[in-house]
Amino acid sequence: MSSDIRVATNQAPLLVGHNIVTGDAALVDAVTRHAAAEVVDDLAPIGALAGTAEAREHGMLANEHHPQLTPYDRYGNRIDEVAFHPSWHWLMERAVGHGLAATPWESDSPYAHVRRAAGFMAWSHTEPGHGCPISMTYAAVPALRADDALAKEWTPLLASTSYDPGLRAASTKRGALAGMGMTEKQGGSDVRANVTEARPTAVDGEYTLHGHKWFTSAPMNDVFLVLAQAAGGVTCFVVPRVLPDGTRNRLDVVRLKDKLGNRSNASSELELEGTLAQRLGDEGRGVRTIIEMVAATRLDCVLGSTSLIRRAVNEAAWHAAHRSAFGSLLIDKPLMQNVLADLAVEAEAATALSIRLASAVDDRNDPHEAALRRIALPLSKFWVCKRTPAAVAEALECLGGNGYVEESGLPLLYREAPLNSVWEGSGNVNALDVLRALGREPEVLDAWITEVGRARGGDARLDRAIQDTLALLDSLMGDPDSMEVNARRLAVRMALCLQGSLLVRFAPPEVADVFCASRLGSSYDGVFGTLDGGDLRAIVERATPVV
């Protein structure tokens, strides 16, 4: 029997033509639960667009053609401009246009942040790198509220749904984007070791900055929140890229970082010498001022990592549903079902926790929600971001050699997978932040106990895990050294209990059962695909994209 070797057979078709929002049962359930079905309907258009071949192609092109820095123009003038591929602008225009930047802060909707979180997760399926400037723009607003005048000046532009790139005075633009400059080469996460100096001018609240920033993403954005040492200590400043008179502020882009992933996004080193800045908040209160921005970007790290897991699971399940081996489809093989079901449970647990966090932002004036947000953000940032590299690698392996080639899109996801665990505080920083919250704010433990306790009696394994976690915490209290050594262990357990509580209360029984058995019980063997029983086929079917 002859065949035409020029025609490929037994290959999965390209995963396009599906709706990233409405086709994700876990996301639909979470958004409906914490917001309303109308929010899902509102997000359906961006979900449909994210699932198109056009969006997929733009995502690949934006990563293939990296940003290019031009320090000087042809005449020798210092311009420090970064040029992006047209696909970057295509992605940015639609992200901003669908309200994924700072729009929720100006919205009257009680579900604005849940809507934005779900939309951010869905649109990130197209390409994760451009989510960085979108995230920083979203996160800048709560920090800007430390100064009414600065908030009124910048918030309407940041909340705009008009994407208006280019270096021009903010007063001439229809919309603006924000960035952040915290770390320096000698200190990294230890921002109190910063050496950039802030010198007051004769104008009230105005300073000039003198120093550097080691990692500032999106240097073409319109405004940056920057930390520097003033006379009173570390202080937060608002730094416009272009001054009101149209001249460019002194932000010298030394180079763009050559990163493992996130290659569509320009991350830069900056030098500041006489850079004009406005003080945001009091001198010496810079960390407390900018922490609101850090909290919001940490939420987006969780959302972005969840999106990476979900996109990888989609690709793996789609491939398995269309690829035959040894006499039947891969998706019908018991061991492949085990792997896919395990990955699907990981994605659903991350989705449920992500949208729960976003709902706490919508209810930010509620004491319980505020306390829960304080403890759950670093917990979730630690755990979900830590799980992403392993989950993406396992999903890639489901495609075999096909998953290892660039055209599949999985290598892009794999390079991106460690990112969110590094940005906005590494794993250790977030685990220690959990300890800091527990030590300084007793209400956060009460909030965690209340939240996980809402599933009490729903699953004996969850009840036991909660008791064991509280016993671990009790055994560590009063011994700072032991507390720090066990910070990661405690963070993992607290995060898993939060996820378990949500799944036991709201997920299909087969999902909750498998989660509790594998993550909270005694059957977990440290690798995906070792589930011991459960309705694996139903879990896989729930997670497999439908076109």
Image (cartoon, helix red, strand yellow):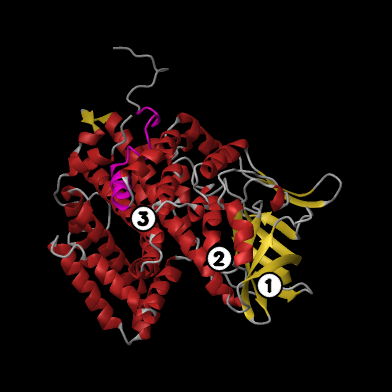
Total count of labels? 3
Query: Is 210 on the left-hand or right-hand side of 2?
Result: right
Amino acid type, mark 1: Thr
Please report contact status of discs 3 and 1: CB closer than 8 Å, yes or no: no
Do we see residue 492 in this rendering? yes
24 falls in the magenta region: yes
Q: Alpha-carbon neighbours of circle 1 within 10 Å: few (<14), some, or many (≥20)?
A: many
Residue at coordinates 37% horizontally, 48% vertically from top-left? 309
Mark 1 and mark 2: Cα distance apart in space: 24 Å
Q: Which of marks 2 and 1 precedes in the sequence? A: 2
**Quadrant showing the N terminus:** top left
Find disc 3 in the rendering and name its residue.
Answer: 354
Q: State the residue lying farthest toward the front.
A: 108
Find disc 1 in the rendering and name its residue.
Answer: 196
Q: Which of marks 1 and 3 precedes in the sequence? A: 1
Do we see residue 326 in this rendering? no
Give the secondary structure at mark 3: helix
Q: Alpha-carbon neighbours of circle 3 within 10 Å: few (<14), some, or many (≥20)?
A: many
Amino acid type, mark 2: Arg
Rendering coords of residue 400 (x, y %): 35, 38
Q: State the residue lying farthest toward the right.
A: 75
The stretch in magenta equals: 12-34
Query: Is 116 on the left-hand or right-hand side of 367?
Result: right
For residue 145, the mark is 2
Q: Nearer the viewer, residue 67 or 246?
A: 246
Mark 3 and mark 1: Cα distance apart in space: 35 Å
Image position of 361 with respect to 450: above or below:
above
